[in-house]
Amino acid sequence: MDISRTPLRAVRAALFTALVVTLSTASHVLLSGVPLPLPTVAAVAAAVFALAYALAGRERSFGRIAALLIPLELAADTIFTTGQHVCYGRAGGPVAGPCARSASTCCAATARASTRASPPRSPG
């Protein structure tokens, strides 16, 4: 069986991407307590998929996969931290001041999603 066929290669890259992005986003949100901006998660997922698709042409050993997974996790964590600081500031609240306009552009999808997901509060 040829492991480099395009459909099988895309499935392998998608599974690897799902593993890396899910582990990275879940651990980052659980440890930081701050949600991740959706555009940042999408950009990381696209980059991981492109890299995984390029490297999925042949079978690799567990050691080589782990050697790729660990730096990818660290890079994704760095990008997620940067995205959180851009959208929410270092203190975890909304960004105010001169950076607010650029932050609102990249975080607009996240703000809309979080307001839809949160239940309405009762006055009192």
Image: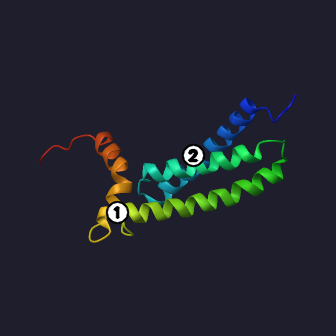
- Which label lies toward us, 1 or 2? 1
Indicate the amino acid at tag 2: Thr
Position of residue 94 in the picture relative to residue 120 (left or right):
right
Please rate how many residues cluster around mark 2, counting C-alpha atoms within 10 Å: few if below 14, some from 14 to 19, many from 20: some
Which disc is residue 114 wearing?
none
**Residue where numbered disc 1 is placed:** 102
The residue nearer to you, when weighing 55 against 88, is 55
Q: Tell me which label, 1 or 2, sits earlier in the chain.
A: 2
Say if residue 13 shows up in the picture. Answer: yes
- Mark number for residue 22? 2
User: For the residue carrying disc 1, how many other residues have a C-alpha within 10 Å: few (<14), some (14-19), or many (20+)?
Assistant: few
Can you give x and y, in whole percent of width and height, for residue 113 in the image?
A: 34, 43
Position above or below: 81 against 51: below
Q: Is residue 93 visible?
A: no
Question: Could you tell me the amino acid type at mark 1?
Answer: Ser
**Residue 72 in the image: x percent, y percent?**
66, 57
Whole-percent x, y for residue 94 in the image: 30, 62
CA gap, disc 1 and disc 2: 27 Å
Could you tell me which secondary element the residue under label 1 belongs to? helix
- Helix or strand or loop: what does disc 2 sit on? helix
